[in-house]
Image (cartoon, helix red, strand yellow):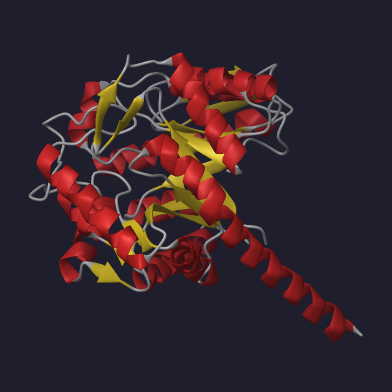
Amino acid sequence: MPVEFIGMIGTRDVSETRPPAGPVVDPDYTLRFARAHEDAGFDRVLIGYGSGSPDGTQVAAYVAAGTERLGLLVAHRPGFVAPTLAARTFATLDQFSGGRVAVHIITGGHDAEQRRDGDYLAKDERYARTDEYLDILKRAWTSSEPIDHEGRFYRLHDFHSEVRPVTEPRIPLYFGGSSEAAYRVGGKHADVFALWGEPLKETAEQITAIRAAAQAAGRTEPPRISVSFRPVLGRTEKEAWERAHRILDTINARGAAGSFVGSRRPTLPVGPDAQPQNAGSQRLLAAAAKAELHDRALWTATAKATGAAGNSTALVGTPETVAQALLDYVDIGVTTLLIRGYDPLDDTVEYGRELLPLVRAEVARRDAAAARTTVGAAR
C-alpha cells in the first residue's frame, strides 16, 4: 500500500527557530510554500488552527486556486460553528478544489486556548461534543434525505444541504489525540488517526488502543494511522547531528518559540519546564525523560526544549537513515507520514529531493514483492 506524505504550510515564514517574517498573511509566500510541497511530491498539506491564526478554509481555497493536484488537510475545531455550516463550508471547498479536501479534527487540548475562542467546556465534554458533531457532519455529507437531530449539544430539524462533496462517499476525516477519550471518539469516526512521533514501542501500543476502540465502536475496518516527525537531514551522520544541535541551541536561545499558526502565547505551556494539559504532549515529554535518542534516529531533545508544544520530535541522520526510520513505522502499521522542517520552505524542497523518493521506492518494492508472492501462492 503506497505511503501518504503530508506537509504543513503557513501564511508566513516562521518556525521554532525562525522569527516571523513579513505580514501575518503573505499571499506570495503562502503560494510559494504550497507549490514547493506540490513540486516535492507531497500528497497533502496540513493547514493548522490557532485561536488567533488566519482562517484555514480561506487559506485552503487560495492554495487550491494556485495549485493543481495538492491535497488540502484543513484543521478544524468542533464547537465554534454549527456542524451543518461546517458541512456546507467544506463541501463547497471540495467542489471548488476538485475533490482535494480533507478535514483534520482537533478537539482541543489546552483550556486557555479554547477559552480564547469562547469555549469553556471541560475536556471530557469537548470530546462528547466532538462525537455528536461528527455524527451530524457525516450525515450531512452523505444523507440524500433531510436530517433531524436531537442531542446533548445540537438540535436541528429538516436540514438538507444542496452542496455535496466531490469525494465519495464523503470528505475524509483525520483525527488527532492521544487520550482515552481521543481513542474512543477517533476510533469511531476517523479515516486516519494522527499521532505525534513517539518511540516505536509506544506508537505500536497506541495503534493497538485505536484499533480496539474502532472495534468497540462496531467498525470492521480500523482507521489508518498517521505519525508526525521533524526530519533533520545531513549528507553525513555527523553533519546531520551538527545541524540538529544548532537547531536545539536556537530553540533554547529563543525561549517561547513561534509556530506555523502564530507566536506562542505565554499562557500556553511552552518550554522545558512546561506542564502541558494534553496527553500527546505529556507522552512526548515522558519519552524525552526516558532517553534523548530512541530506536534508529528518533531524537526527543527538541520536544523537551519546547515543552512538546506541537509535533516536535525529530528524526536525525542522512536521508537513508531517516528513510529507514520512517519505514520502521510503516512496518508497525503506519500509513501516513506528516513531516515538516525547522527551515520550512527549504526543508520541504530537500525532503522532496532526498527523502520522499527513498521511502516511496522501498514501499513500492515491498508491494511488488508481496504481489508476486500472492500470485505465486495462487498458482
Left/right placement of residue 260 relative to residue 165 reads left
Q: Residue at x 56, y 54 (%)?
A: 356
Where residue 197 sits, quadrant-wise, is: bottom left
Q: Residue at x 69, y 24 (%)?
A: 164
Looking at the image, residue 321 lies above or below residue 219: below
Q: Nearer the viewer, residue 202 or 348?
A: 348
Position of residue 85 measured from the top left corner of the image (x, y, whole percent):
52, 18
Looking at the image, residue 370 lies above or below residue 31: below
Position of residue 179 measured from the top left corner of the image (x, y, whole percent):
32, 55
Position of residue 43 measured from the top left corner of the image (x, y, whole percent):
60, 43
> In what quadrant of the picture does the N terminus appear?
bottom right
Left/right placement of residue 304 relative to residue 109 reads left
Q: Residue at x 55, y 49 (%)?
A: 353
> In what quadrant of the picture does the C terminus appear?
bottom right
Left/right placement of residue 134 relative to residue 77 reads right
The residue positioned farthest toward the right in the image shown: 379
Position of residue 42 measured from the top left corner of the image (x, y, whole percent):
58, 43
Q: Is residue 190 visible?
A: no
